[in-house]
Image (spheres, helix red, strand yellow):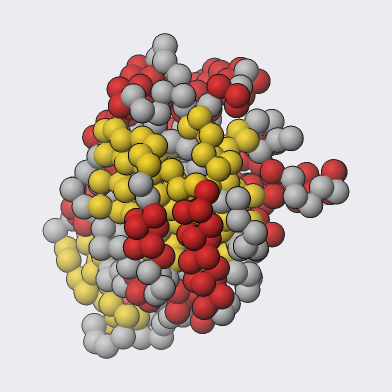
Amino acid sequence: MTSYQTIFSPAAILLPPFSSDPDAMKRWAVIACDQFTSDPAYWESCRKTAQGFPSAYDYIMPEAYLGTEEETIHGAEIGCAMASFDGRAMRRIDGFVYLERTLPDGSLRRGIVGRIDLEAYDYHAGSASPVRATEATVLERIPPRCRIRASAAVELPHILVLIDDHVGLMDNAASLARQIAYDFDLMAGGGHARGYAVEGQEAALLSEKIAEYESSRAGLVYAMGDGNHSLAAARAHWENVKRETGDRDHPARYALCEITALGEESLVCEPIYRILKHCDPDDVIADLSRISDEAGGQQVTVLAGERKEKRTFARPTHALTVGTLQDWIDGYCAAHPSVTCDYIHGETPLCELASMPGNVGFLFDGMDKSELFPYVEAHGTLPRKTFSMGEAAGKRYYIECRRITR
């Protein structure tokens, strides 16, 4: 272990004892719980694939199950899995895992798995902490996740944290990665994962590079990419543990996560579009026209049936187009309680939905990923649902785990 006092540091990372078996690992690893939330068939397929074999599925609650009978059933199964968890049977890596993830489109995303210090993270609006949320945190989503963590013996991360890698941290990690920890195809068309154990002297050298990166950044050091609410729940749980035990170095102080460089070519930030449902399209467009025209400024394309109109906000209320649009949508929905707003990934699905009666869709340009760090430092968190980091099948899979109890 290293003596460097860094925010992101080596961890006691646990892998299944069969981590060298590609078939067993394919059953073990499942995608982040907040994906395919409207597709219970995807999760039923995962359940069948994992059934009868050790699997991360046994330790996580797919959000597709929330509010259904399956939530109670699977919740009991998670409780049993946590209660019987035996870390002694797991393979332990004292250091980092360097990860090469081949995405479904064939591109490569590199990352480093380690632990992040929750004392350096504040998810509240206006935070100036080194680790920050990039989008507004929905506080109501934290207590249920915190309760699950409070009874958990082990954590499995789907958290992806972004760095502005101007020191070559990812290249450095790749040069130190020599011992393969796992190498297998992911289930359900998720691509491929190859992980390398980085321990001992190599972990110390990588920690030096991490320290170089952290010391070179003033203000924002790590920006949340995916899994912000899971990290927020981990922070809330740590506050409870700290208050109850007074133990400043309890395992709950840290959260296992993957860091990746914003500059990775495979990392694509795609805009998340808006659609209004159960509405009168003529009334929606008329109301929008009160604050917009057809020239200059922030532009959106309004889609309703066969109609396609470009509108420009005459007096933007936000630095980003999506923020100004969301401000107007919030006001419109408040005045029209029967109207609902949904968030859509991809232009084609949006156009299909907007062609249906009673729906109005909104297309707009997204922010370039190079703007993320400067924006968060200058303006704080982005409007909710501003961007998505790639398609659902490319999200992080649960592979590694770490004990969070004494």
In this rendering, the answer to whether 157 lies above or below 220 is: above
Decide which of 22, 318 is in the foreground and name it.
22
Q: Residue furthest top?
A: 52
Q: Is residue 367 left or right of residue 2?
A: left
Q: Residue furthest bottom?
A: 296
Residue 278 appears in the figure: no
Q: Residue at x 52, y 78 (%)?
A: 216
Q: Whole-percent x and y of residue 211?
A: 55, 68
Q: Residue at x 31, y 35 (%)?
A: 183
Which quadrant is home to the C terminus? top right
Q: Is residue 43 left or right of residue 93?
A: left
Q: Whole-percent x and y of residue 166?
A: 39, 75
Q: Whole-percent x and y of residue 259?
A: 45, 56
Q: Quadrant of residue 33?
A: top left
Q: Residue furthest left?
A: 306
In this rendering, the answer to whether 309 lies above or below 390 is: below
Decide which of 119, 147 is in the foreground and name it.
119
- Figure disc tally: 0
Q: Residue at x 38, y 19 (%)?
A: 50
In this rendering, the answer to whether 96 lies above or below 376 is: above
Q: Residue at x 65, y 56 (%)?
A: 118
Q: Quadrant of residue 89?
A: top right
Decide which of 263, 373 is in the foreground and name it.
263
Residue 163 appears in the figure: yes
Q: Whole-percent x and y of residue 2?
A: 60, 56
Decide which of 313, 144 is in the foreground and name it.
144
